Image (cartoon, helix red, strand yellow):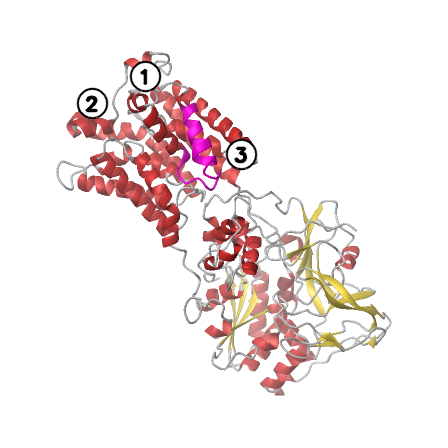
Amino acid sequence: MKLWQVSVSPHVRSPESVAKIMWTVVACLLPPLVMSVFIFGIQTLIIAAVSVASCVLMEAISQKSLGRPVTIKDGSAVITGLLLAFVIPPGVPWLLPALGAVMAIYIGKHLLGGIGFNIFNPALLARAFLVATFPVAMTSAWLPPLADTAIFAYLGSAADAVSTATPLAVLKEQGMAAMVEQFGPLPNLYTNFLLGFRPGSIGETSGLLIILGGLFLIYRGYISWHIPVSLLGTIALLTWIFGGETLMSGDPLLAILSGGALLGAFFMATDYVTSPTGRTAQLIFGAGIGALTVLIRLKGGYPEGICYAILLMNPLSTVLDNWFKPKRFAPPLGGAK
Amino acid sequence: MTSLLTFPKGGVHPSERKTATAGLAVETMPVPDELELILGQHIGAPCAPTVAVKDEVREGMVIGEVAKGLGVPLHAPVSGAVTALGQSAHPMRVSVPSLTIKTDHAAPTPQYQALAWEDLDRDQLRQKVHDAGIIGIGGAGFPAHVKLNPPPDNPVDTLILNGAECEPYLTADHRQMLEHSREIVEGARILLKILGINTCHIGIEANKPDAIAAMSAAVVAGAKPGENIAVRPLKVKYPQGSEKQLIQAITGRKVPAFALPSAVGAVVHNVSTTKAIYDAVALGKPLTEKIVTISGQGIKRPANLLVKVGTRVSDIVAYLGGTTPQLAKIVMGGPMMGFAVSTLDIPITKTTSSVLFLAEGEIDSTPHSPCIRCGWCLEACPLGLEPKEVGIYVEAGRPQDTGPFGVFECFECGCCAYVCPAKRPLVQFIRLGKMKAKR
């Protein structure tokens, strides 16, 4: 007698899947990557290719060696590879991200349990690792934006000759006047920063494209607005209060448009695995990242702090979810059982 | 149409897939040669047979009775002879005691005449509901007369008829409301009299405008002065027909966890149950047949069939021309909460609302992967529970620790597993939690 397959209900499933989410995020990361070629030159594509390839390869090696199913088709390692490339300076040696991939994928992701169980954002963990191991390249290989579309200008050793400082570093070390002098008067400066024409990590500068990608993910329901809004809002508010020469004189817009604030808010802090799931917890998580970012920017040893701010808040995700439980439909009669 | 009522928290919008059968009038299936009657049709103690093998039975005669506890009698759906007292396959309980009747096709079918039920008092009416073997035929199988006798400390002021039919594919209640709207309104009047109240809401999802129109017209024609019966169009959202969600959508009241609707003064009956109560009280006809939606790409001819309780699925398949080669899974009940069955040799019960023959393209057999903590299940859960945590704990070998995440409140609507992008069997994890955790 033929026996038909059985399983527990429901028997129909929504058309969404992990792979669909991941590849959609990848698609949202491509416009800033293409833009980076026109800002910093063709070598950003090479660095990104090395990063993605080594992350995907590392994912396969990790899963094979740990006896887990190989899931490179789900796009998750591709995202990590892209994000890793996005957070390193455009003038670094091309093979640097390959080392980062070992940290991100093997140690940061698979030794901590694999997809769904890693505590820290893998790409940022790798960035922190590279800053510690290659401090010179990771903190000085900044390039000034290309004046024209000479995208091959920085190939070879040309990059070494032109390295510059990021706006946040200039702001931190020399003050607002020096930054305006170097990067232009204020209205133009906002426009340039929004379009991405400023020194910075490969994928963090094109603010407009990052915002559009983030909004698309929110529109698709893949991320919610809570973390980006509270994160950016906190950075803006605290910078306005404490970021100027006197209280309440900081520039909140500049704070959001510089460093990795936008990339972190929309694509790093919203990583499902390393962020809280509850809406209230997400608001607090975002605010915590924003506050730590401003603290590091204004008082810490680094000009930019969002990477460490996110890494510091990541392990609090489950704690926050435990503190802010979803609201139940209706409690039992006579109190909780 | 005024604004549609709904519940505020959670819910999903699965593809409706009702068009294959929504337009098909209910068709009476010829009585098969043999019926297999499960003795435990309802929640509660199963019936003990009151007939023996080789006994002759007449259609409508009591053949099983519950001695004590929660239960209703079972009636012979046909005239014929008892051929076996054995075991049957059951979608939920695997194997259960049953009784087999060989149909005597030559026997006359009983005729039912309208009775003057308005002269009877509440207790007599309620007794008739019990004697006719009425249970909640929307799926739960709760004996109807018990719901009509709410505890004295919880006075009921509102009757709600559930015509939401929010499960995909299902059109049995839809056809019932189109073809028997007068009887349903009459049934509502009987229920109001038994409960001693005058307010009745009939909740129908807005994807059935013809049923809303038919029921509204039947209310205008059938309601008597002093009776406040109204059709309430509902937003199309699953699980709109869940008792707690329906009560909240229509009255704004929230039934507390682990409590019955009477705790907030409400009683809910399915529209098809209401039709059966009309048959029982106004015609004296016991519950022995059922409208069942047969649908899915795996069956040659989809239909809304009126079948005798005890009809085997294999007989239905033969009547409808067989299955298609694409058939992958057979589900009794809706696709969100129904039970997959491994065999066609399984009988229809009073609570079977549909048998779905699903092709590979209609189901999703993708293997599940680890939880990525997207939190979609938390958003989808209409009760504010934490399915993701239950799944993580169960997979970590700690199902006994899942109580705090709400497993005992869960009514297994399946919204969490429906939205899960990792295709995790969250309802299965929750059931395991219910078995292993302490309340």
Q: Are marks 2 and 3 in contact (CB under 8 Å)?
A: no
**What's the amino acid at mark 1?**
Asp
- In the image, residue B187 above or below residue B31: below
Residue B139 placement (x, y as % from top left): 62, 64
Report the chain holding disc 3: A
Q: Residue at x 21, y 39 (%)?
A: A239
Kind of residue indicated by mark 3: Leu
Label annotation for residue B224: none
Residue behind mark 3: A66
Residue occupying image coordinates x 75% and y 63% = B88
| Residues shaded magenta | A97-122
Write down the quadrant of residue B104 in the picture.
Answer: bottom right
Q: Is residue B68 left or right of residue A41?
A: right
Q: Check disc 2 and report the residue beneath it.
A: A182
- Where residue A188 sits in the image (x, y, percent)? 23, 28
Quarter in which the C terminus of chain A is drawn: bottom left
